[in-house]
């Protein structure tokens, strides 16, 4: 994967999810990314959403118009700038990857991975592993989005 360049930067982008929810993103940045000899459009949207009982920063990465990775702010986001993306694959490629079971798929070895309950202390926090990235680390976010895209077979 190689980031070829920035294609566009803007404000006030919205995305209509399959459930017809039109989610606003205050800022976005678009990249051209080359992988496996093909050029892809990658858009990263920055917004806010209620996650685990509080409004948190929310980041979504789209590849060629498909949402492939989602991140949200850790409890200490204001100090660290770190966002989390739950690892949602397990046996059979479905479900969550349980933190309590201690197993992280090998394909995630290039990422900084931590148990979600160690970074989010709230009711209903899932027992999952999560990828950690800094809000400014777009390369890691894009790499995770491509991994998820390939896991889905696209």
Image (spheres, rainbow, N blue to C red):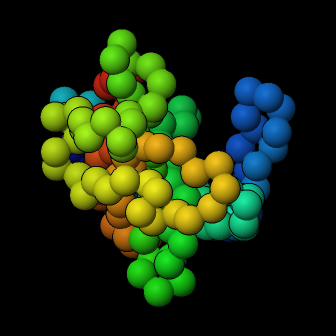
| Residue at the image point whose x is 47% and y is 37% from the top | 68
| In the image, residue 61 above or below residue 95 | below
Q: Nearer the viewer, residue 69 or 31?
A: 69
Looking at the image, residue 150 lies above or below residue 104: above
Residue at 83%, 32% in the rendered image: 20
What residue is at 71 percent from the left and 44 percent from the top? 15
Quadrant for the N terminus, please.
top left
Dividing the picture into quarters, in which one does residue 106 lie? Answer: top left
Q: In the picture, which quadrant includes the C terminus?
A: top left
The residue at the far bottom in this view is: 79
Q: Viewer-proximal residue, 92 or 1?
A: 92
Please provide percent x and percent y for residue 9: 54, 66
Observer-nearest residue: 90 or 42?
A: 90
Left or right of residue 88: residue 113: left
Of 18 and 109, which appears nearest the observer? 109
The structure residue drawn at horizontal position 45% and vertical position 77%, both measured from the top left corner, is 81
């Amino acid at each position: 994967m190689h980031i070829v360049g920035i294609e566009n930067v803007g404000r006030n982008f919205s995305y209509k999810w399959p459930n017809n929810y039109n989610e606003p993103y205050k800022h976005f940045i678009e990249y051209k990314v080359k992988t496996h000899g093909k050029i892809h459009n990658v858009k990263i949207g920055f917004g806010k959403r209620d996650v685990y009982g509080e409004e948190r920063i929310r980041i979504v990465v789209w590849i060629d118009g498909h949402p492939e990775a989602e991140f949200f702010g850790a409890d200490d986001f204001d100090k660290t700038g770190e966002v989390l993306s739950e690892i949602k694959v397990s046996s059979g490629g479905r479900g969550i990857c349980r933190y309590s079971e201690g197993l992280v798929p090998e394909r995630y070895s290039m990422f900084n991975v931590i148990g979600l309950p160690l970074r989010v202390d709230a009711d209903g926090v899932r027992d999952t592993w999560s990828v950690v990235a800094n809000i400014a680390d777009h390369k890691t976010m894009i790499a995770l989005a491509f991994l998820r895209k390939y896991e889905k077979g696209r």
